[in-house]
Image (spheres, grey):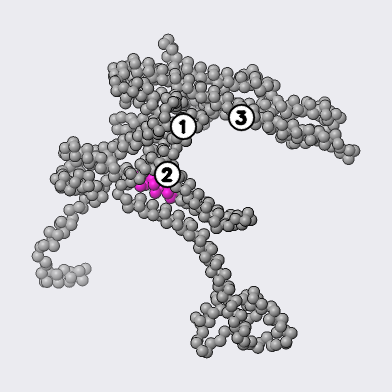
Amino acid sequence: NQLRGRAARQGDPGSSRFYLSLEDDLMVRFGGQQMESMLSRLRVDDALPIENNLVSRIVESSQTRVEGANFDVRKHLLEYDDVLNTQRGKIYGQRDRIFIKDDLNDDVTEMLKTEVLQRVPEALADEGGPWKLLAWLEQIQPSLPLHNSIFPSYSIRLIAEQMMGRKSANLTRQQAQAALLKVSAEAIKAEEEHTLASVNHLLDQSLTRMEEQLEERLDTLDAFIEGIEDGDESDTRSPQQLAEELVQVVRLPIRLNNAQIRELRDDPRAAAETVRDQIEKVMTGLTIARLVGAVQRLIREEIGLAGISLNDADWDDLSDQVIEAVENTFANRLERFIGDAETPGQIASDLEKGLDRLDKETLDTSDLYRLLLTIPQGRRADFDRKTHRRIWVRTTRITFIYAAAKLLENRETEEITQEVLTHLQGAQAAIRQVWGESEINRLGAVRPADLDATARAGLRKALGESAFAEIRSQSFNTLPEVQQNQIEAELGRQAITQIYRQLLLRVISELWVEYLTQMEALRVSIGLEAYAQRDPLVQYKNKAFEMFQGLLRDMRMSLVTRMFTYRPRDLSSVQSNINEVEDAPALVAEAATEAPPSEDTTAKKKRGRRRR
């Protein structure tokens, strides 16, 4: 509602006149009060209009300054908006390319390569060893059961190659059974070694934290005792009240008998020694209890500390007891799972059954993969509290990650990185091949000409125009094997492209919505940077850039994490469609060449429609 703008839009040139009140915001802001006080002293009538060129110029100058200030505000806000608009344009541009691009395999492979080249060296440089890298690889690409084979995870592949001695020769039944039992025992020992190292690290951390907390509570106790000693006759707290207050101050469930409670009032310094001993014992017991819980989660079993009271034993005895309990747990696992020649363990029995099902005298790599995958998982009887029946629960008996991690020790980072990348690209190719086989089996009796336009265009590009023209009217199951392999590869590429398209769009949509929420929170809080003598706009741009780079990393990581295990809910969305009306345009063209109906016939049809 600019004054000059209203006058230009609403007035008639040369006749309309507009008046500005002294109470208008513009006049109040730029000297209207002084003018009003002057008119009051001169006793000028309020209804008398003031017409003066000086006043008009003041009004015009004031309004120009207001317009400039408003423009600066809008320009400043626009600079904030431009940051997000630029990022929005990049994200939406990527989405548009995902929608229209015919082949996304190279893009996804490049993102996979970038993630591997960044993550593998960082994981290998970790002090704990390469087991975290193998755990991540096991998470993103577990062993994949295909049609007639298994594509193993990287850890399983390392174990199998160790068993085969990196040779292509097959193993006999006895050799395979002995090698599998040996590998299982080594896996248990490797996990025990890793667990003991982790437990010792936990013990050191727990002891450090306990000493810090113990020192803090003892200082609090000393201050509390000094307060009691310095108290005068006005301190009327009873011994019981002092004991309750002491429990609240030290934040520990200490218990004092009646004599100790009375001593807290009569001789606070003597009572402090008793309380100090209790604080140390309670802190030790609580720390060990937390440690035992962490260890039990680590080894997936309960460990007993029979015969020792947590509040009466010292730290060294309890630490030794925890270490001994962990060692006994893994010794029991060896006996229970592996056993010996007289009493075979669970894994030995399961391997015997698995070898009987295979019914082979020599085993190849694929057979070893199948047997290796049966080893980690087991089952145990449990009691269902709801149904009051016995149930079987699947459990993890062993893990090959720590044994496989030993195989990566003393190897070059570049070699491992390239090997991991080649393995994951092989998993991509295996999944693509499975989709191709599934598609060509589903479309066995269908002709290439019956497929939708997108599938036909892909086949033309893969086979060539002349080759496609020769087979377009033949069913897939009648084609030569060479052409079937080419078609299988192309249909697999099309299916996996649709899967990648769905996954990319889902990842972008999920993370982009979260990112917009974070950017809104940043924009609300960025004004506080001005208190630190920093330009909020500059800080907003810097942090927005960092957040956007993090968004791209999260998108890449989320894609790589889900690309090997993602399965579409609707298979028809990734399968080639059958176009049943492909020949319809030809029929229409033939009908158009027939003689047109006579005028009498057309008139009769129109009259018939009117009657109806």
N-terminal-most mark, 3 or 1: 1
Q: Which residues are magenta?
A: 500-510
Name the residue carrying label 3: 205
Name the residue carrying label 1: 124
- Quarter of the figure with the C terminus: bottom left
| Amino acid beneath label 3 | Gln
Q: CA distance from mark 1 to mark 2?
A: 20 Å
Q: Residues within 10 Å of mark 3 (few under 14, many from 20)?
A: few
| Secondary structure predominantly adopted by residues drawn in magenta | helix
| Amino acid beneath label 1 | Leu
Q: Is residue 140 left or right of residue 306?
A: left
Q: CA distance from mark 3 to mark 1?
A: 24 Å
Rendered image quadrant of residue 69: bottom right
Name the residue carrying label 2: 556
- Quarter of the figure with the N terminus: bottom right
Compare residues 297 and 420 and report the one nearer the observer: 420
For the residues carrying marks 1 and 2, which lies nearer the camera in this image?
1
Residue at horizontal 64 percent and vertical 17 percent from the top: 307
Residue at horizontal 66 percent and vertical 87 percent from the top: 47
Question: Do callouts 3 and 1 mark residues in contact (Cβ within 8 Å)?
Answer: no
Q: Residues within 10 Å of mark 2 (few under 14, many from 20)?
A: many
Question: Do callouts 1 and 2 mark residues in contact (Cβ within 8 Å)?
Answer: no
N-terminal-most mark, 1 or 2: 1
Residue at horizontal 26 percent and vertical 37 percent from the top: 437
Q: Position of residue 9 (x, y in %)?
A: 49, 81
Rendered image quadrant of residue 25: bottom right
